[in-house]
Image: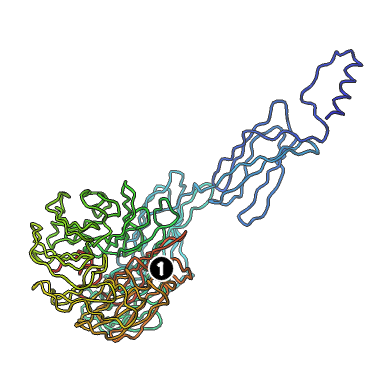
C-alpha cells in the first residue's frame, strides 16, 4: 500500500494538486469486498439466495459453493453481472445446506460469506387415507392436503397379482372414490399420490380386503414380539364353515375358531386363515405389524444433570390395562403415560416444582387417577388419566417411602412418608381425612377392608382404622423391614410376607394381628437386604436380595432354590419380581449385564435376555418390573450421561391372579380385595 500511495501522491503534485483522491482505488491484488446482507430462503427442492454489495462495487460475477448430502462439493459461477439474486435448484428436501457466496473481480475473488437454508416440500401428501371394504368394492376417503393440489393418481393391485397395477386419475376436488369389480377375500393395496405443479407428493398407502362378510376379528394389528394376539373366526357369518385353521410364520398351524398367538419375530408378518365353505376352501391373508419391543423409550426430561431414569419405582397400569405409567427419579420427577397397544408415549406431566423421587406410583382402580410423590416435602400429586393435575397434598414430608394405597371403592388414598407420618386423603378433593405419626419411615401399606396395615423401616407393623386412623393393633418383629419394599400377600388374603434386612423374612397374619414366623434368616449366601417379594400361585415366595442372589422359599420360608445373578452387590435391589400364571418367576439385574432372568417354578433358568442388547455398565435395573398381557415391563436407572430405559419385552405369559408386583392388581393399588 505504501508504494502505491507514493506513486499517486507524485502524480498529484505533477498536476498541481488539481485531481481528487478516489477512496475506491486499492492496491492491485488486494482482497475485494465481500457480499453483504446475504440471505437464503428455502423452497421446495430449491433455495433462493439474495445479497447486496457495498456502494460503488460491481463485481463481474459471483461463485456459489455448497455440499450435497453425499458430501460432494458443488461450485459454479452465477454468470449474472449486476444481479444479486440466484435460485439454486435440484436440492434435497429436509437437508440443511450451507451456501458460500464469493464476489469475482476479474482475476480476483473476495472472501466467502455463508447462509444456511433447509428446503422442504410444499407437495403435502394425503395424511388420512382410509379404506372401507364391502363385497367386491372398496371405498377410499381422504382430505385434500393443500389448495395447490392439481389432482391425484390412484394405483392399486391385488396380493395375488402384484404386477397387474391399475391406475385412476382423479380431479383435485375429489375426496372419496369407489373402486369396484374387485375379487372378494383378497387383500388389495391402494396408493394415492397428490399431483402438484412441481411434481408428485409422497405416497399414502392403505390395504383393504373386499368380502361378503368379515371372516375374522383380530384383537390388534399392531403388536410386539412375545405379546399375545387374539384371533377369532366369524362363526356367525360362516355358520357351516369347517376345518378352520390359522397358519403362522414358520408354518405353525393351529386349528379352531379362537386362537391366541405371540409372534417371535419383528417386522410385517402374514397369518393365513383358511376354512371349508361348502365344497371349496376359502383363504384370507392377515397382515400384522410386529415391533421388537412392546415399549422402548430413553427420552426423559432432565434438569441440572445430563441423565434421568428410574429408581425405587415400578411401572403400573390403568384399570383397563391400556396405559402404562412410570415416574422418573433423578433431579426432576416427571410422570409418563404410554399406550400399550402402540408403544407410543401418550403424554407427560411435569410438576412446576422440581424434585427427584424415590416413590412408587399408584393408580386409582376406579377412576384411573394417578398418585405419586417426590423427595421434597409437600409434593404429593394427583393427576388424572389425561395428564392434568387434579390436586396437590402439601402436608407430607419426603415421599421416599412406601407406595401409596387406594381403598377398593377408590374414594380414599393412603400415603406414608419418610418421616413416619401416615395420612388418609379424600381422593376427589385432596383434603386430609386424618393423619398420624408413627415415628419411622413408612416401608409398606396395605388396605385390608376397614383396616390399614402400615409397615415401617423399623421393627413395628401398625394396624390402623381406615376411617379414623386410630391404632387397632401393633406387632413387633425382631428385624427391621427393608425400606419402601412393601408386602407380599398369599392367596388366602391374610397371610403376608415381610422382607427384612440381614437376609431375613417374616410371615404374619394381618387378620389375626399375629406373627407366624419372626425374622427368619433364610438365605444361604451373605445375608443382606431382601426386596419386594412376590407369591406364586402354589404359595412359593420369590424375592431378590442385595447379596446378588434371587431366592425361592416355600410358604414357611424354607429355601427351595437360589440363583446368583451377577458378581458384586446390588444385583436385585428394588427389582420388583413378577410371577405368571404358570408359576414362572421374572426378575432383572441391577448390575452390569442388564438381563431379564426367567425361572421355572423349580428354579431352572428358562432365559436370561439382555435388555436392549447393549454393553453399557451404567444403565442398570433399579426401577422395577411389572407383567401384563404377555409382556414384562422393566425400568432401568441410567447414569452419567446415559438415560435409563423403559422396555417392554414379550414373554407370552400373563400375570398370576391375586397378589403380584406392587399391590395386588394391575393398578398397584395395594388393596386386598
Q: Percent from the top left, x then y, of residue 69? A: 60, 55
In this rendered view, identify the residue nearer to me: 100 or 500. Answer: 500
- When asked about the image quadrant of residue 407, the answer is bottom left
Q: Position of residue 545 (x, y in %)?
A: 32, 75
Q: Quadrant of the C terminus?
A: bottom left
> Which sits in the foreground, 250 or 654?
654
Determine the secondary structure under disc 1.
Answer: loop
Question: Which residue is pictured at 18% across the width and 72% down the height?
Answer: 477
In the image, residue 636 sits, relative to residue 121, either above or below, namely: below
Residue 382 visible in the shown view: no
**x and y, in percent, of residue 429 in the image:** 16, 49
Q: Nearer the viewer, residue 105 or 393?
A: 393
Furthest toward the right, the residue is 14
Residue with the mark numbered 1: 620
Q: Residue at x 24, y 73 (%)?
A: 499
What count of labels does the image hold?
A: 1
| Residue positioned 68% across, 43% down in the render | 64
Mark 1 neighbour density, 10 Å: few (under 14) some (14–19) many (20 or more):
many
Residue 7 in view of the camera: yes
Report the coloring of the rendering: rainbow
The residue furthest front is 478
Q: Quadrant of the N terminus?
A: top right
**Residue 394 appears left or right of 61:** left
Where residue 638 appears, as percent x and y from the top left, is: 42, 63
Above or below: residue 108 compared with residue 134: above
> Is 21 located above or below residue 591 in the figure?
above
Residue at x 70%, y 35% (from the top left corner)? 34
State whether residue 240 is above or below residue 213: below
Amino acid at each position: 500500500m505504501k508504494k502505491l500511495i507514493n506513486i499517486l501522491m507524485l502524480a498529484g503534485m505533477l498536476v498541481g494538486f488539481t485531481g481528487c483522491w478516489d477512496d475506491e482505488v486499492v492496491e492491485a491484488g488486494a482482497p475485494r469486498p465481500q457480499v453483504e446482507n446475504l440471505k437464503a430462503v428455502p423452497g421446495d427442492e430449491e433455495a433462493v439466495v439474495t445479497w447486496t454489495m457495498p456502494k460503488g462495487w460491481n463485481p463481474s460475477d459471483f461463485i456459489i459453493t455448497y455440499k450435497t448430502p453425499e458430501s460432494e462439493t458443488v461450485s459454479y459461477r452465477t454468470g449474472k453481472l449486476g444481479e444479486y439474486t440466484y435460485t439454486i435448484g435440484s436440492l434435497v428436501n429436509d437437508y440443511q445446506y450451507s451456501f458460500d457466496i464469493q464476489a469475482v473481480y476479474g482475476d480476483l475473488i473476495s472472501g466467502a460469506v455463508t447462509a444456511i437454508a433447509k428446503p422442504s416440500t410444499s407437495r403435502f401428501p394425503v395424511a388420512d387415507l382410509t379404506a372401507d371394504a364391502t363385497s367386491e368394492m372398496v371405498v377410499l376417503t381422504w382430505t385434500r392436503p393443500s389448495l395447490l393440489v392439481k389432482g391425484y393418481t390412484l394405483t392399486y393391485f391385488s396380493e395375488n397379482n402384484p404386477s397387474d397395477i391399475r391406475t385412476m386419475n382423479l380431479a383435485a376436488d375429489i375426496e372419496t372414490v369407489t373402486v369396484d369389480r374387485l375379487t372378494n377375500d383378497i387383500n388389495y393395496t391402494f396408493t394415492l399420490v397428490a399431483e402438484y405443479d412441481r411434481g408428485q407428493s409422497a405416497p399414502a398407502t392403505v390395504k383393504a380386503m373386499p368380502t361378503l362378510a368379515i371372516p375374522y376379528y383380530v384383537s390388534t394389528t399392531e403388536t410386539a414380539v412375545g405379546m399375545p394376539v387374539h384371533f377369532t373366526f366369524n362363526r356367525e357369518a360362516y355358520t357351516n364353515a369347517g376345518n378352520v385353521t390359522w397358519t403362522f410364520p414358520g408354518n405353525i398351524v393351529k386349528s379352531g375358531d379362537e386362537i391366541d398367538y405371540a409372534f417371535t419375530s419383528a417386522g410385517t408378518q402374514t397369518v393365513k386363515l383358511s376354512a371349508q365353505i361348502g365344497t371349496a376352501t376359502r383363504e384370507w391373508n392377515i397382515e400384522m405389524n410386529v415391533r421388537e419391543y412392546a415399549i422402548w423409550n430413553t427420552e426423559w426430561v432432565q434438569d441440572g444433570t445430563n441423565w434421568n431414569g428410574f429408581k425405587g419405582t415400578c411401572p403400573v397400569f390403568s384399570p383397563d390395562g391400556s396405559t402404562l405409567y412410570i415416574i422418573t427419579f433423578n433431579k426432576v420427577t416427571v410422570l409418563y403415560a404410554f399406550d400399550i397397544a402402540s408403544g407410543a408415549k401418550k403424554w407427560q406431566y411435569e410438576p412446576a416444582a422440581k424434585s427427584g423421587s424415590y416413590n412408587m406410583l399408584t393408580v386409582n382402580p376406579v377412576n384411573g387417577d394417578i398418585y405419586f410423590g417426590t423427595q421434597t416435602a409437600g409434593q404429593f400429586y394427583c393427576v388424572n388419566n389425561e395428564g392434568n393435575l387434579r390436586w396437590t397434598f402439601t402436608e407430607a414430608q419426603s415421599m421416599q417411602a412406601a407406595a401409596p394405597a387406594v381403598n377398593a371403592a377408590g374414594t380414599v388414598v393412603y400415603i406414608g412418608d419418610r418421616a413416619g407420618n401416615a395420612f388418609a386423603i379424600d381422593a376427589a378433593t385432596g383434603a386430609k381425612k386424618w393423619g398420624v405419626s408413627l415415628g419411622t419411615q413408612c416401608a409398606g401399606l396395605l388396605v385390608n377392608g376397614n383396616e390399614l396395615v402400615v409397615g415401617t423401616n423399623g421393627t413395628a407393623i401398625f394396624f390402623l382404622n381406615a376411617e379414623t386412623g386410630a391404632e387397632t393393633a401393633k406387632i413387633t418383629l425382631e428385624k427391621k423391614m427393608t425400606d419402601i419394599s412393601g408386602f407380599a400377600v398369599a392367596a388366602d388374603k391374610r397371610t403376608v410376607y415381610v422382607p427384612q434386612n440381614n437376609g431375613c423374612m417374616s410371615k404374619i397374619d394381618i387378620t389375626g394381628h399375629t406373627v407366624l414366623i419372626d425374622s427368619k434368616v433364610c438365605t444361604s449366601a451373605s445375608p443382606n437386604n431382601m426386596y419386594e417379594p412376590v407369591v406364586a400361585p402354589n404359595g412359593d415366595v420369590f424375592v431378590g436380595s442385595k447379596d446378588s442372589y434371587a431366592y425361592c422359599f416355600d410358604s414357611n420360608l424354607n429355601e427351595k432354590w437360589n440363583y446368583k445373578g451377577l458378581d458384586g452387590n446390588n444385583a436385585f435391589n428394588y427389582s420388583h419380581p413378577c410371577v405368571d400364571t404358570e408359576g414362572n418367576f421374572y426378575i432383572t439385574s441391577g448390575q452390569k449385564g442388564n438381563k431379564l432372568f426367567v425361572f421355572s417354578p423349580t428354579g431352572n433358568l428358562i432365559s436370561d435376555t439382555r435388555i436392549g442388547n447393549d454393553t453399557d455398565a451404567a444403565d442398570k435395573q433399579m426401577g422395577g418390573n411389572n407383567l401384563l398381557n404377555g409382556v414384562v415391563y422393566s425400568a432401568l436407572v441410567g447414569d452419567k450421561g446415559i438415560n435409563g430405559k423403559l422396555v417392554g419385552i414379550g414373554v407370552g405369559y400373563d400375570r398370576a391372579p391375586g397378589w403380584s408386583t406392587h399391590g395386588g392388581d394391575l393398578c398397584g393399588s395395594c388393596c386386598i380385595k
